[in-house]
Amino acid sequence: MTTTVGNQTVRGRLPVQSTDLPPSINKLALLLIVGGGLGAGLIVYRTGQQTDVLVASRTIHPGDTMSASDFDTVRISGGSSNTVAATNEHSYINAVAVTTVPSGALINSLMFHARSGVLPSNGQALGISVPAAQRPSSQFSAGDVVQAYYVQSGNTAAGEVPPTASKIANPLLVIGVHTSSGDGSSIVSVLVDADTAAALAIPASHGQVVLTRLPPGAKPELSLTGR
């Protein structure tokens, strides 16, 4: 805007609206700043808290029974329902793994059956004596899924099923293995229900069971979770 004073032209400024904010808005802004500062402080405080939790000291396989040597302790910031405090380690001694746990992985309760329920209510552990010639050359281990065959003769080449063999049961989960240091024979413990136990007991006692290892991903008829 311009005005004329005498013979001179004076250039002025346009009116400017006041920038003063109402007191209520100023108070709100102050509350937001203070609240944000408190929230940030709480986050820093919580992340600064350290918790000792359990991790696997080795690769754990389904069916493995836990001991103190299977666990290590690490310190992490905070903690959650997906971890197990190191002070609760005693609750997992003698527990049985229901899944593969890689070495160094954080332990959580879903990985194990508590010692009060090692086997599912509808399950039994059945031991089968397997000569070295009636299993694959590589030893079975807990977590393997195997197929049991009935054979009339114990003279069977390693890992081979004779033409006269017949399946005794659906695929079975191996939950434990004990191998003799002498002749290489093994006691393979498998998880079975009552009907399968009855079908396997007699041929197993006569050395007439051959076990074959099924491919990874095979599903057993009964698992440690009862399904």
Image: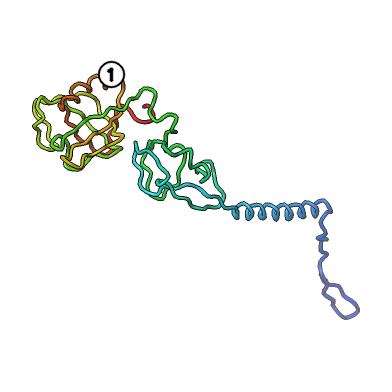
Residue 109 lies, in percent from the top left, at 47, 38
- Asked where in the image residue 140 lies, by quadrant, the reply is top left
Q: Residue at x 35, y 46 (%)?
A: 59
Q: Nearer the viewer, residue 185 or 39?
A: 185
Identify the residue position indicated by label 1 in the image. Answer: 195
Vertical order, 42 against 16 (above or below): above
Q: Residue at x 36, y 22 (%)?
A: 122
Please indicate whether residue 205 sits to the left or right of residue 70 in the image: left
- Location of the C terminus (image quadrant): top left
Q: Residue furthest front?
A: 182
Vertical order, 41 against 111 (above or below): below
Classify mark 1: residues with Cα within 10 Å, few (<14), some (14-19) or many (20+).
few
Residue 57 lies, in percent from the top left, at 40, 49
Q: Residue furthest bottom?
A: 7
Helix, strand or loop for disc 1: helix
- Location of the N terminus (image quadrant): bottom right
- Asked where in the image residue 145 lies, by quadrant, the reply is top left
Q: Nearer the viewer, residue 14 or 32?
A: 32
Residue 54 lies, in percent from the top left, at 47, 47
Please indicate whether residue 78 sits to the left or right of residue 105 in the image: right
Residue 16 lies, in percent from the top left, at 81, 64
Q: Amino acid at mark 1?
A: Asp
Please indicate whether residue 122 sits to the left or right of residue 1 in the image: left
Q: Nearer the viewer, residue 217 or 29?
A: 217
